[in-house]
């Protein structure tokens, strides 16, 4: 089955991390057909970085930006989704370093009527400082959390993969969908302002529409650069929205 894939990268005022994400795209065993930067209101430094990498990355790169009016990740992802020209969409965050087989792995397990939930290794603060400052890092897993997520074992993935009905442990920094399935449910719910649960809400609505979930353990390896916890002052409101989605016939 042949289809095109768009890689959507969400970012906000962290060009040092986004640079590492874009660097990792340069070495993919299989390139995406396009890259879209979903920018939640970054300043000019991010724009300059993207212009630099437009000259280096072989596929088209589009920079989708809206003004900084607070944490509006759901809204900027929807804008990026509308711009996407591919059948299949992979979402990552702009502080994710991709394993060389990341795109190829996603394409290998893409299946109609399924979305894919991946995992990630959380890098230590020490290693993150080394990487973002351009210094050599001999052991990327030093002090990392979830080290098991850093093992790429295709045969083991085949043994444990399969559909699941759970909506828990959703990782918005590594997920993939058919574009038509997202359009069918109206994309992300833009009422989610601030950190928390917009990805889970999306997943619940997809599953209620008949789309099944498949986990990507031991494939699609990626590394999450360290950062402080996001402001969670709006989490309670988001939780109330999510409960309505979870309990209702949405």
Image (tube, rainbow, N blue to C red):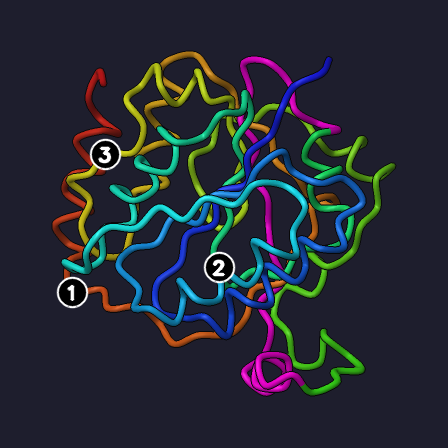
Query: Could you tell me residue 223's position as x and y percent?
Result: 63, 62
Query: Could you tell me residue 111's position as x and y percent?
Result: 64, 18
The mark closer to the camera, 3 or 1, is: 3
Q: Is residue 163 left or right of residue 177?
A: right
Q: Residue furthest front?
A: 55
Q: Residue at x 61, y 36 (%)?
A: 215
Query: How many numbered marks appear?
Result: 3
Which residue is label 2 attached to?
50
User: Which region shows up in magenta?
Assistant: 108-134
Report which quarter residue 204 is drawn in. Answer: top left
Kindly check if marks 3 and 1 are in contact, taking CB atoms under 8 A apart as contact.
Answer: no
Q: Residue at x 58, y 61 (%)?
A: 21
Name the N-terminal-most of marks 3 and 1.
3
Task: Quote the CA–CA distance across marks 3 and 2.
Answer: 27 Å
Q: Secondary structure at mark 2?
A: helix
Which residue is label 1 attached to?
233
- The N terminus appears in which quarter of the rendering? top right
Does the rendering let one see residue 169? no
Which residue is label 3 attached to?
189
Task: Quote the CA–CA distance across marks 3 and 1.
Answer: 19 Å
Seen from the viewer's position, the closer of residues 37 and 137 is 37
Kindly check if marks 3 and 2 are in contact, taking CB atoms under 8 A apart as contact.
Answer: no
Q: Residues within 10 Å of mark 2 (few under 14, many from 20)?
A: many
Does the rendering let one see residue 73? yes
Query: Could you tell me residue 167's position as x and y percent?
Result: 42, 35
């Amino acid at each position: 089955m042949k289809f095109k894939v768009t890689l959507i990268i969400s970012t906000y005022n962290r060009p040092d991390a986004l640079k590492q994400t874009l660097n990792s795209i340069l070495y993919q065993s299989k390139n995406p057909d396009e890259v879209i930067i979903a920018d939640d209101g970054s300043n000019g430094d991010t724009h300059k970085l993207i212009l630099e990498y437009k000259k280096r990355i072989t596929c088209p790169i589009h920079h989708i930006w809206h003004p900084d009016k607070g944490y509006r990740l759901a809204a900027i992802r929807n804008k990026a989704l509308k711009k996407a020209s591919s059948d299949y969409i992979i979402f990552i965050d702009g502080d994710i370093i991709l394993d060389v087989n990341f795109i190829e792995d996603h394409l290998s397990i893409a299946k109609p009527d399924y979305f894919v939930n991946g995992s990630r290794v959380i890098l230590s603060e020490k290693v993150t400082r080394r990487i973002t400052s351009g210094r050599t890092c001999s052991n990327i897993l030093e002090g990392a959390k979830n080290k098991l997520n850093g093992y790429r074992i295709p045969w083991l993935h085949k043994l444990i993969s399969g559909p699941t009905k759970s909506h828990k442990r959703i990782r918005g920094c590594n997920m993939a969908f058919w574009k038509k399935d997202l359009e069918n449910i109206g994309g992300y719910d833009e009422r989610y302002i601030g950190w928390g649960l917009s990805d889970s809400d999306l997943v619940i609505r997809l599953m209620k529409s008949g789309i099944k979930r498949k986990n990507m353990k031991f494939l699609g390896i990626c590394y999450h650069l360290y950062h402080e916890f996001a402001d969670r002052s709006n989490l309670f409101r988001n939780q109330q929205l999510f409960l309505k989605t979870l309990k209702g016939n949405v």
